[in-house]
Image (cartoon, rainbow, N blue to C red):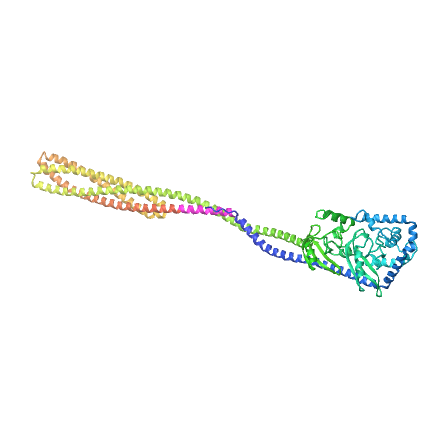
């Protein structure tokens, strides 16, 4: 069955060279890529963790500084004096300015109401009757808010820039003395507001920022349930100096409902608690800390890295997210694809902040908050973007915060991506080089092999044609040898017949010779007695007639021998020709053929001599017949004839003896020719067997050449 190959030798060599060239590269490249990728991933996490640790330490230091400043500021004599003075002046406000306020109460209340209406409009999610809840019941609060808020020439958010109200009273004098100092202090250390709170009633006797909480009571006023009120209550209840409480972010109505963070501590004059000092920590300052003043790129944050703080209790953000700060429109467009409460989105749009509204659902952050330990890994952020995340608790007393640092996977592992493409490009280049080299080497091997196969195929075709010619010649020779063998068999049979006839002729000649001797004896006896001549002559005549017949047969045999000798000569010549054509195998046969030809020539000569003798015998016989006939006419002549006959019989005896000898020699020659013909037949049979063997060998050679041609074709297809 012919083997079918799907690939040629050239293609297989090409594939093998490519595999030999590429497999080591793939193995080493894959191993190197995996190791490098793991190292780069670890480096990405290490960089993120380092960034997170730095921000965590920074934030912890930020609040530690706030705490230290709080403690220092609480013990400052100026603050103690300011607490006393503001408390006394606050208590004198209604007495000193109440009548004047009442003279124009409706106008003043309308102005104040307009400010509260503005507050309501800018506060997210408050009920329509919220103003009634916010409206200050204490007249002192309305007077101070009128003087420092509605009558304040500075815009909302800048009210702290007013040091002295237009009306002269004790409070305004004290305010003028301290406002500039406290404002500078708050601005320098990143506070949104500073409060001095009277401990017995909870009134805010001083506020730097002058929001709507100014002059209200944190015990009974509209903001008694806020974070500031909670911080005040904790500081008020403390029994130790240096106590500091930090209240976590939560919505604060006086700040338009924005999430606010407060820190508070009691103020002591000696051993007496005379008030509470509180600060509202600036979100902007915290954002600056977490965002490196929004200089993410110069700070090495890249395109997507950000750090933010999450409250472990409600998982709400405590600082703004980077995507929001960089592009609010892009942030809100992206967050539409996230399953988030629409109210939370509206609140972020209202306050232009993600603090308190954006909830973090990352399992990594939750695990870090629950286990109070650092956790890192892969996750998706609040925008469903794949990121790497590290989260660790922030150690600030009173705050259950977790600092989160995350970076987009694409950017974090950008080096891995670059490495992958570099390896890919290198692989392609190596593949191109390997393919080129493989093509060169496969061609250098296959092309000479292909040429050799073509030469083999051509030679096989030529040899096949020659063998076919030899096969035809051998077939023709085999046919000729078969014909020659058949002819020789026929000749052999003829020679056997001639041999039998020659044997019979020899026996007849011997008999004739015996009769001739007997005739001679009779003639001698006839000389002794002529009485019985007539009977003897008649017998002689009869015997002569038989002799005539014998001689006729001898003549026929001689003619046959002569013809056979001629045919034998022709066969010997043909055999000599065939022997020449048979080459080495016919040399011995050529010698035999020459001997046969010589014997044939001798046989022909002997036959001619026998014919001559037979003619003479026939003449003598005819004469004897005439004599015998005449002997009946006269006895005298019988004597003479007897004498002549005696002489003739003497001669005839010699001739008959010679003929017998010749016939014997012919018999021997025929036997020799028969033996020679037998040898010729055996030689022809040997030649026939050789020719058949040669023909069989040529056939096998032809089959081998055909197989060689098929192999050459298969190799050609393979190459």
Identity of the residue furthest to the bottom in this view: 270
* 492 or 584: nearer the viewer: 492
> Would residue 700 be counted in the magenta stretch?
yes
**Dominant secondary structure of the magenta stretch?**
helix
Answer whether residue 68 is visible to the viewer in this image. Answer: yes
Q: Position of residue 425 (x, y in %)?
A: 64, 52
Q: Is residue 298 left or right of residue 450?
A: right
Q: Which residues are magenta?
A: 698-719
* 442 or 506: nearer the viewer: 442
Relative height, residue 126 to residue 289 (above, below): above
Q: Is residue 373 left or right of residue 435?
A: right
Q: Is residue 601 left or right of residue 91?
A: left
Q: Position of residue 277 (x, y in %)?
A: 83, 60
* 382 or 397: nearer the viewer: 397
Q: Position of residue 509 (x, y in %)?
A: 18, 42
Query: Number of callouts in the render?
Result: 0
> Would residue 14 be counted in the magenta stretch?
no
């Amino acid at each position: 069955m012919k083997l079918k190959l799907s690939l040629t030798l050239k293609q297989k060599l090409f594939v093998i060279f490519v595999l030999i060239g590429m497999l080591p590269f793939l193995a080493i490249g894959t191993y190197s890529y995996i190791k490098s990728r793991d190292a780069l991933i670890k480096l990405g996490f290490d960089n993120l963790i380092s960034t997170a640790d730095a921000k965590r330490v920074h934030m912890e230091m930020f609040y530690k500084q706030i705490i230290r400043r709080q403690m220092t500021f609480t013990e400052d004599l100026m603050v103690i004096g300011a607490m006393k003075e503001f408390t006394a002046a606050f208590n004198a406000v209604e007495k000193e300015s109440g009548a004047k306020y009442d003279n124009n109460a409706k106008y003043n209340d309308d102005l104040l109401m307009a400010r509260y209406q503005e507050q309501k409009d800018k506060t997210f999610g408050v009920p329509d009757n919220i103003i009634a809840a916010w409206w200050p019941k204490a007249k002192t609060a309305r007077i101070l808010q009128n003087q420092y808020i509605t009558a304040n020439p500075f815009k909302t958010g800048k009210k702290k820039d007013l040091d002295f109200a237009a009306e002269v009273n004790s409070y305004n004098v004290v305010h003028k003395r301290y406002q500039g100092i406290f404002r500078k202090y708050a601005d320098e250390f990143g506070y949104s507001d500073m409060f001095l709170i009277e401990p017995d009633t909870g009134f805010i006797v001083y506020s730097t920022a002058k929001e709507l909480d100014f002059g209200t009571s944190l015990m009974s006023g509209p903001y008694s349930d806020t974070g500031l009120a909670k911080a005040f209550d904790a500081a008020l209840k403390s029994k130790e100096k240096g106590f500091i409480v930090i209240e976590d972010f939560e919505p604060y109505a006086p700040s338009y409902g924005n999430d606010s963070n407060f820190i508070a501590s009691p103020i002591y004059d000696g051993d007496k608690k005379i008030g509470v000092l509180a600060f509202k920590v600036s979100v902007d300052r915290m954002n600056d800390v977490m965002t490196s003043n929004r200089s993410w790129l110069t700070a090495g944050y890249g395109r997507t890295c950000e750090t933010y703080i999450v409250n472990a209790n409600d998982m709400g953000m405590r600082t703004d997210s980077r995507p929001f700060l960089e592009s609010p429109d892009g942030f809100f467009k992206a967050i539409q694809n996230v399953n988030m409460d629409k109210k939370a989105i509206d609140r972020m749009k209202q306050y232009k902040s993600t603090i308190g509204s954006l909830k973090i659902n990352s399992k990594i952050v939750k695990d870090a908050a629950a286990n109070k330990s650092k956790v890192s890994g892969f996750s998706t952020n609040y925008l469903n973007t794949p990121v790497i995340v590290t989260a660790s608790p922030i150690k600030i007393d009173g705050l259950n915060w977790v600092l989160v640092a995350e970076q987009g996977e694409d950017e974090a592992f950008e080096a891995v991506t670059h490495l992958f493409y570099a390896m890919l490009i290198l692989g392609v280049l190596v593949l191109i080089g390997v393919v080129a080299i493989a093509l060169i080497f496969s061609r250098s091997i296959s092309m000479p092999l292909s040429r050799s196969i073509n030469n083999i195929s051509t030679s096989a075709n030529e040899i096949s044609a020659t063998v076919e010619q030899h096969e035809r010649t051998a077939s023709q020779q085999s046919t000729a040898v078969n014909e020659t063998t058949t002819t020789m068999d026929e000749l052999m049979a003829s020679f056997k017949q001639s041999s039998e006839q020659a044997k019979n002729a020899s026996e007849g000649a011997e008999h004739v010779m015996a009769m001739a001797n007997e005739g001679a004896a009779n003639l001698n006896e006839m000389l002794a007695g002529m009485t019985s001549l007539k009977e003897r002559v008649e017998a002689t005549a009869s015997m002569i007639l038989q002799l005539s017949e014998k001689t006729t047969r001898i003549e026929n045999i001689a003619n046959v021998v002569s013809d056979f000798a001629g045919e034998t000569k022709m066969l010997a010549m043909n055999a000599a020709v065939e022997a020449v054509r048979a080459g080495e195998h016919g040399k011995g046969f050529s010698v035999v053929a020459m001997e046969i030809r010589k014997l044939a020539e001798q046989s022909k000569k002997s036959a001619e001599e026998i014919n001559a003798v037979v003619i003479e015998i026939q003449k003598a016989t005819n004469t004897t017949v005439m004599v015998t006939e005449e002997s009946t006419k006269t006895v005298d002549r019988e004597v003479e004839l007897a004498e002549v006959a005696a002489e003739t019989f003497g001669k005839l005896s010699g001739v008959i003896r010679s003929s017998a000898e010749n016939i014997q020699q012919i018999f021997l020659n025929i036997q020799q020719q028969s033996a020679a013909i037998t040898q010729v037949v055996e030689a022809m049979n040997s030649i026939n067997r050789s020719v058949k063997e040669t023909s069989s060998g040529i056939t096998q050679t032809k089959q081998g050449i055909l197989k060689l041609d098929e192999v050459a074709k298969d190799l050609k297809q393979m190459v």
